[in-house]
Amino acid sequence: MLLEELQYEAGMLLYTRISWGLTIVATYTNLFTPETWTSFVARGKTVSGFRDSQRRAAERLQPGDVFVCYTVRLSRWCGLLRIASATYLDTAPIFSDPDPYVMRVKVEPIVTLDDLEYAIPIYDDAVWPKLSLTRDLEVRSSGWAQTANLRSSLRLLNENDAKLLSDLLLHQAEEHKKHPFTAQDRRRLEGRRSIRTADRTVLVEVPEETIEAASVVPGEIADTTGPRESHKIQALLAMIGVEMGFRIWIPRGDKQAILNQVPEAQHVQFLDILPLNYDDTTIDLPPGSSLAVM
């Protein structure tokens, strides 16, 4: 499709003529993981789904509204979809089995950047300083995605943001410019692996191994007399778990520092090993990581 035709299509996406004037079509964010985007593409790009917890927001969607698709973990804009049906409940597995995305709508792709190396990074100079969600934030600042409300789908975009992202995606569909994965991108893509428990297969997320930077003035010596702030938080969360009746597992590299802050009578509540089958994924967790069973 020529760029001029795509731009016309974008105009039809954002505005719809009705008998008494011009109506602006609502444009929403639709968040995917790299895995659910791959599944969406592989299954024909005809159905998008949301968790039941988002039922109320999903039921506001109307045929003709637009999704701007965003891939979490990679922080990239990857598609434009037109909603083609009312919202409906369907528990048949599509994206995984079991499938949590049961509030569904039929969609028609306008632009889909199937290969995520061609998706547009949100940090790009054409995006970050111009998008109202991010332009007042420092690039890659801590917690920026939460502040920008890019942790869940179905955020209603304002007209300027909708037009900016639509234009960029339509242009990228024509230009097909590659944005190669960084080393960090590749670590994030490799961070989810499946393991086998006694009764099912689960996904675990292996976080990146990071080094905690010390805030030390040159020429001074860091204060190492007390526990690290991260260990204090881990100990607090562990004690909450103990009070709720849970058994607690702490990575080997952190365990003694946590136990030093917990009453000795509670040490019996701390596990030495996880109740998972012996597996390379679980034993490869870096010190300081937590295991998320999903």
Image (cartoon, helix red, strand yellow):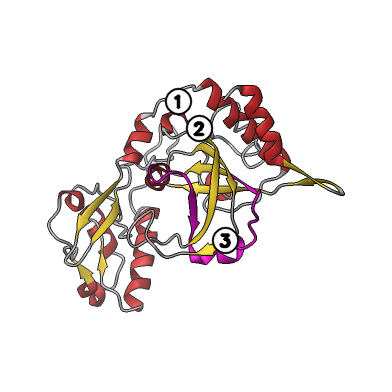
Above or below, 18 against 137 in this view is below
Work out how far the residue at label 2 is from the one at label 1, CA to CA, in angstroms: 8 Å
Helix, strand or loop status at disc 3: loop
Crowd around label 2: few <14 · some 14–19 · many ≥20 (10 Å): many
Crowd around label 1: few <14 · some 14–19 · many ≥20 (10 Å): some
- Which residue is tagged 3? 87
Residue type, mark 2 in image: Pro
Q: Nearer the viewer, mark 3 or mark 1?
A: 3
Crowd around label 3: few <14 · some 14–19 · many ≥20 (10 Å): many
- Which residue is tagged 2? 121
Whether residue 281 appears in this view of the structure is: yes
Q: Residue furthest front?
A: 19
Assess whether mark 1 and mark 3 are in contact (beta carbons under 8 angstroms).
Answer: no
Helix, strand or loop status at disc 2: strand
Most foreground residue, 17 or 237:
17
Does 166 lie within the magenta span? Answer: no
Residue at the image position 66 percent from the left and 28 percent from the top: 7
Residue type, mark 3 in image: Thr
Q: Position of residue 247 (x, y in %)?
A: 26, 72
Q: Tell me which segment is drawn in magenta.
A: 42-67
Q: Earlier in the sequence, mark 3 or mark 2?
A: 3
